Amino acid sequence: MGAGDPKDPRRRRLLRGGLGLGAALVAGRAAAGTGAPDPKITELQPWTSGPGVGVEANPYGLPVRFEADVVRRNVPWFSADTISAVNFTPLHALDGTLTPNGLCFERNHAGVAEIPPEDYRLMIHGLVERPLVFTLADLMRLPRESHSYFLECAANTGMEWRGPQMNGVQFTHGMIHNVNYTGVRLRHVLKAAGVKPAARWLLAEGADAAAMSRSIPLEKALDDCLIAFRMNGEALRAEQGYPVRLVVPGWEGNVWIKWLRRLKLGDQPWAQREETSKYTDLLADGTAREMSFVMEAKSVITAPAPENPITHGKGPLVISGLAWSGRGRIASVDVTLDGGVNWHAARLDGAAGPKALNRFYLEVDWDGRPLLLQSRAVDETGYVQPTKNALRKLRGLNSAYHMNGIQTWAVDADGGVSNVELG
Amino acid sequence: MSNWARLSLLATLAAAPAAAGPLGRPALPAEIAAWNIDIRPDGAGLPEGRGSVTDGEALYAEACAACHGDFGEGLGRYPALAGGQGTLKADRPTKTVGSFWPHLSTLFDYTRRAMPAYQGQSLTADQVYALTAYILNLNDLVPADFTLRRQNFTTIRLPNVAGFRPDDRATVEDPLFHQPPCREACGTRPQITARASPGLTPDAR
């Protein structure tokens, strides 16, 4: 069954009403094909003949109703309930690099805590000279910086360890977002408390009903971590930790503690549940890696993708995708159309900083034949994104986390796209 | 002071913030005690208290079994707390306190901070000792007449304590992934060997 088949859900989806940007392109082409004048041009349209709503209609602007399908989605069978659960960023519907705040995937362990800003407290104690309590107002008097970083859940793409599972880039790769954070360097706050020489580790803890907690090496805490209170210019969303979250650039999302309430300095890690039972990588020999914080270089094509079939037929085709590395900048991205026989240098758009999402494009002239699309990122350290099979060979099938292997999309002759693996 | 001098003074203060500055205030002992809930594998942080397997069994039936099952087997998608010993190399491992967790302190710490689900920090120290003892018993790690207390806590070792190693990707894996990749005429066009499972993916509309 392909996208041309009238029974194909992808086709039905395109033909149904309430079309967004993607499907609208098809409609425009159909009108142009008939040779008759396009009534959307020759007839006066309501948005031209009358006014729209005024400036008081939407004090906080939301996307236009035609984009109502561009939402985070949950996979109900993943978790017992929606309170300790995850939803996914609709990567297929986004372009550029920054993720709109309302579309940043959520992973909560006890739902979304709602903390009035005046009730917010941050405590720093343990191996420090002066245990301190900061209010939000205190934090906002420290020198501020803004940086864009990706946050990727260590389990992103984890369903794919045993083979292709999810037919959509939202679900295979959507546990990631890329946000411009404003906050203060964690090291300024630690210095205010006076870190004692014996301290080696930091425990960061949230104020939610899971009191989410992780041990972080002091070296990282003193390096590029931020205590952030703004995302993309506005206050953090509640589901992203309002009023304050930790930003741990390049490291797995679980350590980016939301609703941050406590920082404790110590001389050894705390073996928290999320660094023993979870977020450890079980290898084929039955042992597990722990403290595997860094998210290694990875990329994915977001269009075409299962949610973005090619609907325009042969001719010019824009291939678009994302690449990132927890070790720094992306040096280059190659794209293959034939499952890895020949690779083409993609164009990196704009200048992304280190540990941030990069947007890449490759413009091709599609001849209408099936494609086996892949992208492969190389980061500034020379690390080349591996294949999924290379990772399986090293780690086995039960590793669950840190799946950064190359993703393959098969494009049919009719433009339909599906998640496949090659051999 | 000239405007310029005042500005540069402000800049200096900003660059060396809060050396012992006015920001933040001392955390009081009672405040630290209220939030200082973490427990380490060496027992640091354990409160005074005690709890028996028998006490834990009753409490567990009331507060935990609805999700985790009478025997810690895990109901529906709720996690199992017992069993799975010897499965870590199996095709489908069962990772539990008994089969996978390295340290008992994590069970005490996590139960106290986060369980019963979504009622964090609602249990007393004695209740957490009792539940910890009972989950140990469900995993056949202590007898039914056992009582766990602060004093004997660190004598209990979980079976998989040696099953973890620090992240060694940088030395074990990364050298393999630093070879310049083939970019042209790299073998023959591969075949599709697997497709995404039908029916797993939610509709995008």
Image (cartoon, rainbow, N blue to C red):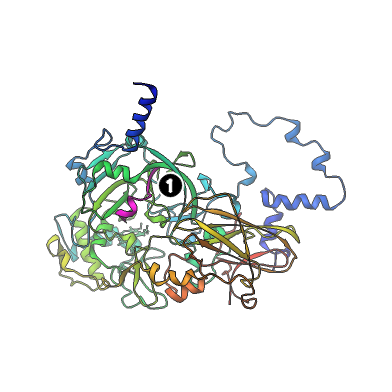
Residue B116 % position (x, y): 30, 56
Hey, what amino acid is under mark 1? Gln
Is A167 positioned to the left or the right of A120 in the image? right
Give the magenta-colored segment's residue range.
Answer: A214-229
Judging depth in this view, the residue of A386 and B8 nearest the camera is B8
Judging depth in this view, the residue of B83 and A289 nearest the camera is A289
Judging depth in this view, the residue of A94 and A144 nearest the camera is A144
Is A376 positioned to the left or the right of B93 in the image? right
Residue B78 % position (x, y): 38, 63
Residue A17 % position (x, y): 69, 50
Answer yes or no: is residue A216 visible: yes
Is A219 positioned to the left or the right of A241 in the image? left
- Which residue is drawn at the image coordinates 47% and 61% (left, top)? A156
Query: Which residue position is annotated with label 1?
Result: A240
Q: How many marks?
A: 1
Of all residues, the one furthest to the left in this rendering is B151
- Which residue is drawn at the image coordinates 63% and 73% (left, top)? A341
Residue A324 % position (x, y): 50, 57
Quarter of the image for the C terminus of chain A: give it: bottom right
Could you say which quadrant of the image residue B195 lies in? Answer: bottom right
Answer yes or no: is residue A137 visible: no
- Which residue is drawn at the image coordinates 76% and 61% (left, top)? A314
